[in-house]
Image: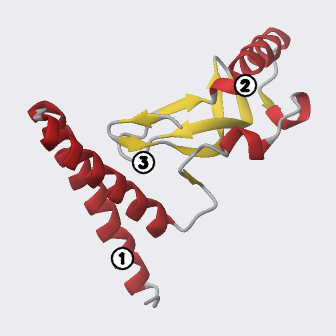
Amino acid sequence: MSFCCGASMIGTNGTLKHFRTHIHNVPILFCPVCHRVEIHYLIENEYEILAEYAHGDGASEVDFIEYVEQKDKELFENCVNNENEDPMDVVSNQIDMALDLLCFAKQIGDETWQGDLKRRLGVLNQRRNKLRQRRTSEGYC
């Protein structure tokens, strides 16, 4: 499980750009707070090799899945959330974890960390409110 900004990162597949080559379906970890993206550590070497070969061949697009055998279940089994989950559940889980960390930061007296977590909670709360508003406008309860 990877953490960024006090939030656990979400496991998903995405498209990354390596120079002029777009590489699709790359296993990545995505931060729901700051939107940082990391290549999943278990496939970093394979990604680098494919990216260099694709760039060297002048390919504008390649699909990671076509060239690298992967096991999605194993890659994302230690992620707290993944892209297939309901966005409201993801945000709620992120808020719960940030609140737990905030309690711990208070116990150890780390005021800097507390401030960081409070800012992250603010971002997550805004995202939750937007999701609620979108669901209300779309007729969901």
Q: Position of residue 8 (x, y in %)?
A: 44, 43
Give the residue at mark 2: 43
Q: Which mark is residue 32?
A: 3
Q: Is residue 45 above or below residue 17?
A: above
Residue type highlighted by circle 3: Pro
Q: Are marks 1 and 2 in contact (CB under 8 Å)?
A: no
Question: On residue 132, which mark appears?
Answer: 1
Determine crowd level at label 3: few under 14, some 14-19, many 20+ residues with C-alpha closer than 10 A. many
* Residue shown at the point (42%, 48%) measured from the top left: 32
Is 135 situated left or right of 84 in this image? left
Q: Amino acid at mark 1?
A: Arg
81 vs 22, nearest the viewer: 81
Is 45 placed left or right of 11 in the picture?
A: right
Q: Position of residue 60 (x, y in %)?
A: 77, 26
Is disc 1 in contact with disc 3, using a CB cutoff of under 8 Å? no
**Residue 37 appears at what percent x and percent y?**
51, 33
- Picture quarter containing residue 25? top right
- Which circle's residue, 3 or 2, is located before the other in the chain? 3
Q: CA distance from mark 3 to mark 2?
A: 21 Å
Return the residue nearer the eye: 111 or 19: 111
Pointer 3 and pointer 2: residues touching (CB < 8 Å)? no
The answer to which of marks 1 and 3 sits earlier in the sequence is 3
Q: CA distance from mark 1 to mark 3?
A: 17 Å
Q: Residue at x 72, y 15 (%)?
A: 48
